[in-house]
Image (cartoon, rainbow, N blue to C red):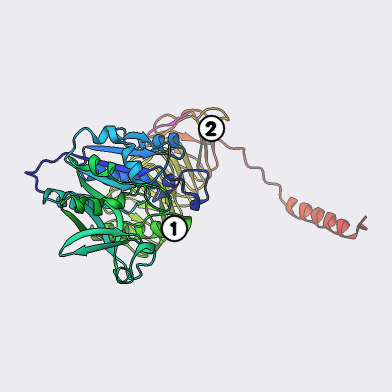
Amino acid sequence: MSKSQKRSCIALVLAAGEGTRMKSTIPKVLHQVAGLAMVNHVVKAVAEAHVDCCAVVTGNQSDLVEQAISGFNQQAEFFPQVQRLGTAHAVLAAESALARGFDDVLVLFGDTPLLRPETLLQMRQCLADGADVAVLGFHADDPTGYGRLVEEDGRLVAIREHKECSAEELAIRFCNGGIMAINGAKCLELVKSVSNNNSKGEYYLTDLAQIANERGLKVVSHKGDELEILGINNRVELAEAEQIWQQRRRRELMLDGVSMIAPHTVFLSHDTAIGVDTTLEPNQLFGPGVMIGKGVRIRGYCHFEQCNIGDDCDIGPYARLRPGTAIAPKGKVGNFVEIKNAKIASGAKVNHLSYIGDAEIGEKANIGAGTITCNYDGVNKHLTRIGAGAFIGSNSALVAPVSIGENAYVGSGSVVTKNAPDDSLVVSRARQTTMEGRAVILKNKALAFKKAKSQKPSS
């Protein structure tokens, strides 16, 4: 749509369905793709298409749906559909919003998580070009079960349900995708003209095409991608949508300069951000809220959620970065390391077999293998501070709250319970005792016990 044509727009997202085929205790539209509820994928596309108002028609467990959407988009408005009598009836649930006089009305569905904002802009362009009703369609190799878009001389004259098609119409492969764009000045009048004169006694929005044609209005179709407007009705289709979304997003990232050695083993979230020249080795899982900088190497079998990794870091393999983790540029996190709610400064290293929780680690500090920050006392979490250049020996336990000064050295196997000043050496462990020949005595005693146990009769 031309920037010179400033048209107001409302998007009406229909999310009132029961979703019985999902066989779930939560509303269908709240099932997730890429860590985000399906309906919020649609709400996100609406926002990215620069729509003025997002109105959501709710029904089944409306409080849960409203809560989920409000947490994602605080500007969304909600309209309950108390009785669910068809798609046109659902549109009229938001009559008060439609009556505000928007130029464009988009009617969308909350179970189409693959919808792109570009498609919504194209639908609006149809209205800007003079259409009164535009219907999104797609070409199907097998159109069985889909409503057909019946066209004559470039006009869309009707949307025919599969069971109502003539033999000639059944041969049509151009199918109804469900999504519509409607002239805002005529929307309510058209929708109110829909009758329930059908076998189910419901009000179908698809009747708009024929009604608008009968009134001499311009009705057109717009060709879209079948996968993009895939509606999700059960968990098999949910998994298929996840796969499509992941493939799409992996491709986008790779085209933007991210290397993936085995793309099909990388699983992303809806908001995963990865900088150029970053390399992802096989088997990665990104939960929501992950940002990765440029030139990062992510080695195999890592798990991330709500964390930030700076430029030129080296992570993994087998690393788990949990919420609140921030790794500054050139940080190193090695194999079998878990980090939570901790800040790792530039050049610091946590190379292997460590747990770092609720901590601040200074520049170029080195954390030895097996080090843990004992951050939890059973009730509260406490902070561990490790200064720049500090060296923490292997198998050390830092009992928080505790601070290790800059360039301090903690001997291996230490249990540190008191603050260590800058440049200090801390050794906190029992003095070694060596008893020569004692090992033979202990071993013989153990063997005798084992022999006696094996000879003892069973009860």
Cα distance between the residues tagged 1 and 2: 38 Å
Q: Residues within 10 Å of mark 1 (few under 14, many from 20)?
A: some
Quickly name the residue at label 1: 239
Amino acid type assigned to the residue bearing label 2 in the image = Tyr
> Which of these two is toward me, 122 or 398?
122
> Which of these two is toward me, 190 or 296?
190
Q: Position of residue 281 (x, y in %)?
A: 37, 61
> Which of these two is toward me, 81 or 339?
81
Q: Is residue 85 left or right of residue 216?
A: right
Residue drawn at point x = 37 percent, y = 53 percent:
268
Q: Is residue 436 left or right of residue 96?
A: right
Secondary structure beneath dot 2 equals: loop
Q: Which residues are magenta?
A: 402-407
Amino acid type assigned to the residue bearing label 1 in the image = Ala
Secondary structure beneath dot 1 equals: helix
Quickly name the residue at label 2: 376
Q: Is residue 430 left or right of residue 409?
A: right
> Which of these two is toward me, 325 or 18?
18
Q: Position of residue 77 (x, y in %)?
A: 31, 33
Residue drawn at point x = 66 percent, y = 43 percent:
433
Residue drawn at point x = 42 percent, y = 40 percent:
323
Residue drawn at point x = 84 percent, y = 56 percent:
448
